[in-house]
């Protein structure tokens, strides 16, 4: 595997590749890493590599001519070279990307610098723009070193025992199981007994479960990429019940005040389907109470009749799980009454998030709101509007306004129960 690194700081690489497996692999010619000074490809006497951006703005860009000349010269002689540019705008480096890179014999890495590189270099020469994370480094040299190290590990002979690569975290998209070495007891903490049994079948099973657990707890997003069997799934359900997150969330389906299609404030009528479907979604995602806000007496009575059927009447026998979902439903006359009830339960008023199909300024995203709800020691209430949506007055007095759900189409008319399900999944999914 040949890496050619193009940089304005060749000295950066003097030490990074001079130890460990990379050094050994280089000594055995399994890896061939060469460092090329971009300034050597300048044709002016001051060897200038950067220039100001057209259109103004701060910072300097790597100019195209020396870069283009360098890449052309470094490509010469290789049949199918891969040209990478390190940049915070690139695709995120992952195990899959690293593996792809390791499939090439000749890899040229352009270390981005300053504010970036002239866009035409990307268009003309770069195959993949790579970022090593959502933060800005002082230069792409750090990223280049990471790319060389990570992709070399997949090259035969770089790591002595190839099994240790296939057992690495991220292979099979899972994190690694916990590992221990001597002593058996360290500061009162013992090695798990199973590891001392010498029973390799049981140890393998234990390790697989621990890897699953580790992944589920620390990086549940990775589980999406692996196919779980029924046993794994069952096991994760037990792990999940041991690590219930401590969020305290409530939802309300608001029938007043909402807009009608002429933007007049009205009280809308409830829909039987909304009562059932949102109650089931709320129970699924661990919502403490589902408030149905409707000030109209006849509406409240009708909703109570529906509830009674499932809570006390023939519905209890017909479908007990429906009863368990509807148990969390509370009929209220106003948002204020809902807030007071939550305050009674929690000892403090909840933070309020409104949802809407329209865009507003300063909306909050799903990951961010999830993070706040999970990290907060505070109850949260999420409002879903009926009719043509919650009134401006309600929306403007909320702590957060959640970004609207959007597909690639312009059609934007989800039913409130569909929207509630999608939103609850984005905010409260356990991500198995
Ligand atoms: N250059 C500056 N920041 C970077 C990052 N996060 N990844 C790759 N190259 C970079």
Image (cartoon, rainbow, N blue to C red):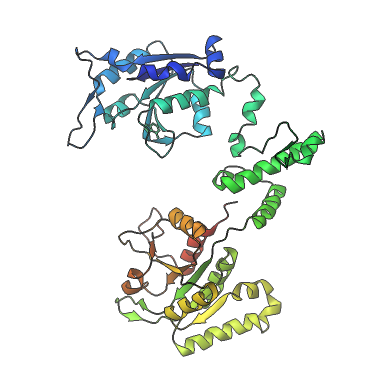
Dividing the picture into quadrants, the one containing residue 311 is bottom right
Q: Looking at the image, in which quadrant does ligand 1 appear?
A: top left
Residue ID at (46%, 17%): 15
Query: In the drawing, does residue 260 fall left or right of residue 351?
Result: left
For the residue pair 145 and 185, the one nearer the viewer reads as 185
Location of residue 266 with respect to 22 vertically, above or below = below
Dividing the picture into quadrants, the one containing residue 355 is bottom left
Residue 187, image x, y percentages: 70, 40
Query: In the drawing, does residue 334 fall left or right of residue 166?
Result: left
Location of residue 317 with respect to 298 vertically, above or below = above
In the rendered image, the residue lying farthest to the front is: 187
Residue 75, image x, y percentages: 38, 15
Location of residue 260 with respect to 359 vertically, above or below = below
- Give the number of marks: 0
Residue 100, image x, y percentages: 50, 28
Dividing the picture into quadrants, the one containing residue 27 is top right
Q: Is residue 424 visible?
A: yes
For the residue pair 182 and 101, the one nearer the viewer reads as 182
For the residue pair 32 and 336, the one nearer the viewer reads as 336
Query: In the drawing, does residue 24 fall left or right of residue 194?
Result: left
Query: In the drawing, does residue 263 fall left or right of residue 432?
Result: left
Residue ID at (44%, 85%): 295
Residue ID at (48%, 72%): 348
Q: Is residue 227 visible?
A: no
Location of residue 23 with respect to 330 vertically, above or below = above
Residue 304, image x, y percentages: 56, 85
């Amino acid at each position: 595997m040949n890496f050619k690194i193009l940089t304005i700081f060749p000295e950066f690489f003097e030490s990074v590749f001079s130890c460990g497996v990379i050094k050994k692999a280089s000594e055995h010619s399994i890896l061939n890493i060469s460092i090329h000074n971009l300034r050597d490809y300048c044709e002016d006497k001051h060897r200038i590599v950067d220039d100001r951006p057209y259109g103004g703005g701060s910072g300097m860009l790597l100019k195209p001519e020396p870069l283009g000349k360098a890449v052309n010269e470094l490509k010469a002689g290789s049949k199918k070279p891969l040209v990478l540019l390190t940049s915070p705008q690139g695709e995120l480096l992952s195990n899959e990307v690293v593996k792809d890179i390791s499939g090439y014999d000749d890899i040229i890495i352009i270390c981005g610098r300053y504010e970036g590189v002239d866009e035409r270099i990307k268009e003309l020469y770069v195959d993949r723009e790579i970022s090593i994370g959502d933060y800005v480094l002082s230069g792409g040299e750090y990223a280049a070193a990471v790319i060389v190290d990570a992709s070399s590990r997949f090259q035969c002979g770089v790591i002595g025992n190839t099994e240790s690569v296939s057992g690495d975290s991220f292979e099979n998209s899972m994190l690694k199981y916990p590992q221990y070495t001597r002593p058996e007891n360290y500061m009162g903490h013992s090695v798990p007994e199973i590891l001392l049994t010498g029973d390799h079948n049981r140890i393998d099973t234990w390790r697989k479960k621990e890897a699953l657990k580790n992944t589920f707890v620390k990086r549940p997003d990775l589980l999406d990429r692996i196919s779980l069997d029924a046993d794994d799934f069952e096991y994760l359900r037990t792990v999940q019940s041991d690590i219930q997150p401590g969020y305290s969330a409530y939802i309300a389906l608001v029938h007043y005040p909402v807009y009608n299609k002429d933007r007049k404030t009205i009280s809308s009528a409830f829909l039987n389907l909304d009562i059932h479907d949102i109650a089931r979604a709320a129970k699924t995602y661990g919502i403490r109470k589902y408030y149905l806000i409707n000030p109209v007496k006849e509406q409240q009575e009708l909703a109570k009749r529906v509830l009674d059927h499932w809570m006390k009447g023939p519905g209890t026998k017909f479908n007990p799980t429906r009863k368990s979902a509807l148990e969390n439903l509370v009929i209220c006359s106003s948002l204020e009454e809902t807030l007071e009830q939550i305050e009674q339960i929690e000892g403090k008023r909840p933070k309020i998030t409104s949802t809407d199909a329209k865009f507003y300024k300063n909306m909050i995203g799903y990951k961010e709101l999830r993070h706040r709800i999970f990290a907060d020691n505070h109850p949260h209430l999420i409002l879903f509007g009926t009719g043509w949506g919650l009134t401006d007055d309600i929306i403007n007095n909320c702590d957060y306004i959640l970004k609207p759900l959007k597909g690639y189409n312009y059609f934007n008319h989800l039913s409130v129960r569909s929207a509630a399900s999608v939103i609850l999944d984005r905010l409260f999914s356990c991500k198995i």
